[in-house]
Amino acid sequence: MKTLILIRHAKASLPQHGQRDVERKLAEEGREIVQFLKNKMVNPDLILCSHAVRAHETATILAKGLGYPHHQIITEKKMYSSHEELLMEIITSTPDSVGTLMMIGHNPEITGLSNYFLNDEIESLPTTGVVSVSFITDYWNEIILSKKIENFILNPNSP
């Protein structure tokens, strides 16, 4: 079984004068999702994140909270301002030794990718939103054809 966890980074600060979008830091730390993921017994084998500061800061908070070695977070530039097809290529080329893959990125790509796997589409995954889907297969390059199980969706803006 393979499990994919898609996360939109925590809320970012407003851009400062002359600051590039990729340099924006977190406005909120997003620690509330750490406890939620711990309660769901999430244990990633690999964390990939965009190279944007806010995504990497989110990945660092999650890694620390979940006991994942910070130095093993992989920063993937292709996850920033990408498209769902490229993200799918990243997923399907993940080593099969990885059972649970966590990806921290941006909208609209994370929402689009989530909707590719969900039975009922979501309009927009908010900041610190999480989608978890498992696939009945041992190979990442077979997830598209595999039976899927929607594990959970976290929308921190919902009551």
Image (cartoon, rainbow, N blue to C red):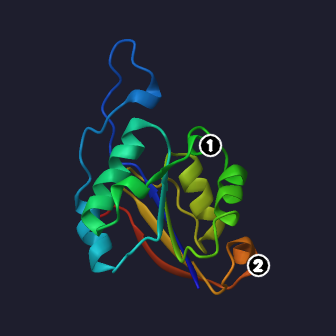
Quarter of the image for the C terminus: give it. bottom left
Considering the numbered disc 1 on the image, is that residue within a helix, a strand or a loop? helix
Badge 1 is on which residue?
78
**What's the residue at 30%, 68% (across, down)?**
66
Q: 147 or 64: nearer the eye?
A: 64
Q: Residue at x 58, y 65 (%)?
A: 121
Q: Circles 2 and 1: CB distance less than 8 Å?
A: no
In the image as oriented, which residue stretches furthest toward the front?
Answer: 71
Name the side, left or right, on which 137 lies relative to 51.
right
Q: Nearer the viewer, mark 2 or mark 1?
A: 1
Residue located at (54% from left, 77% from top) = 99
Q: Which residue is mark 2?
A: 145
Q: Amino acid at mark 1?
A: Lys
Q: Say what amino acid the circle numbered 2 marks.
A: Leu
Q: Position of residue 129 (x, y in %)?
A: 40, 58
Separation of marks 2 and 1 at Cα, in angstroms: 24 Å
State the residue at coordinates (64%, 87%). 136
Is residue 49 found left or right of 24 in the rendered image?
Answer: right
Q: Is residue 140 left or right of residue 10?
A: right
Q: Position of residue 131 (x, y in %)?
A: 47, 67
Q: Find residue 157 and name its label.
A: none
